[in-house]
Structures are given as C-alpha cells and as structure tokens.
Amino acid sequence: MLRFDNAPKKATNLSLNSKVLEVARELGMNVSQTVDALLTKEVERRYWEGWNERNKEAIEAYNARIRRDGIWGAQHRTFAGSLGDGRDTPDPRPDLKPAPTKRKVA
C-alpha cells in the first residue's frame, strides 16, 4: 500500500515554464504544495495501473469464479437481495428492485 503522509520534505530543483510559474505566483499559489499534490496523484495512478496489469490474470480468474459460482454465502444473505449472488443469471426477485425516484427541479 502506498503511504506518503508524514514523509519528510526534500529540496528539489525543477525546471518549470517561466510564464506558468509567474502566473501561479501572481495567483498566490504555493507551487511546491501544488506540484507535490499533483505528483502524488500521478505516482498513485501509475502505481495502481501497474498493479492492475501485474495482477490482471488473478483478477480475471477471480471474476470468472464469481460469475461461475457466485459469492459465498449470498444465498443466505437477508439484505441486498437485488444485488443477486454475483452469478450471470437474471435476478430471481425483480419485484424487490427499488422504484425510480422523482427529482425536484429547482
């Protein structure tokens, strides 16, 4: 699991577009904080993208097993009946599905 909170800061030199940097400063932006937040999001995105790729076969096998066998204990569940048991079969109790709600327009 990726955890970046409470990590110490490290001074780093970056080359940034001078006009963007100028406008960012005029807007009162904390460039260090902004770059840190955006870099964190990109690192997390790439990490999980790689994780999904490395685990693709296991995820596909698990999903195939759930489609084939269903979710363990689902037949005994007394809640969330409309969710079914995970298998690719029609819902045996379509009458339990919630009715659509009407939204008020302001």
Image (spheres, rainbow, N blue to C red):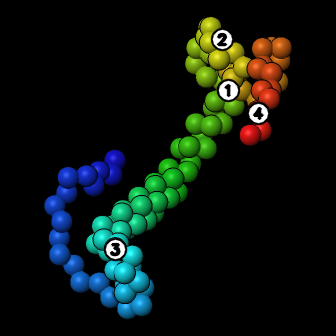
Amino acid marked by disc 1: Gly
The amino acid marked with disc number 2 is Gln
Q: Farthest residue toward the bottom?
A: 18
Mark 3 — residue?
A: 28
Helix, strand or loop status at disc 4: loop
9 relative position to 59: left or right: left
Position of 105 relative to 56 (above/below): above
Q: CA distance from mark 1 to mark 2?
A: 10 Å
Q: Earlier in the sequence, mark 3 or mark 4?
A: 3
Q: Nearer the viewer, mark 4 or mark 1?
A: 4
Q: Quadrant of residue 22?
A: bottom left
- Residue 67 is situated, as x and y percent measured from the top left of the image, at 69, 31
State the SS at label 1. Answer: loop
- Nearer the N terminus, badge 2 or badge 3? 3
| Badge 3 amino acid | Gly
Residue at 46% from the left image edge and 55% from the top image edge: 48
**Residue 43 visible at all:** no
Q: Which mark is residue 86?
A: 1
Locate residue 101: give its quadrant.
top right
Which residue does the numbered mark 2 point to in the structure image?
A: 75
Label tally: 4
Give the crowd class for mark 1: few <14, some 14-19, many >=20 residues within 10 Å: some
35 and 48: which one is in front? 35
**Left or right: where 106 falls relative to 34:** right
Q: Secondary structure at mark 3?
A: loop
Between 59 and 6, the one lying in front of the other is 6
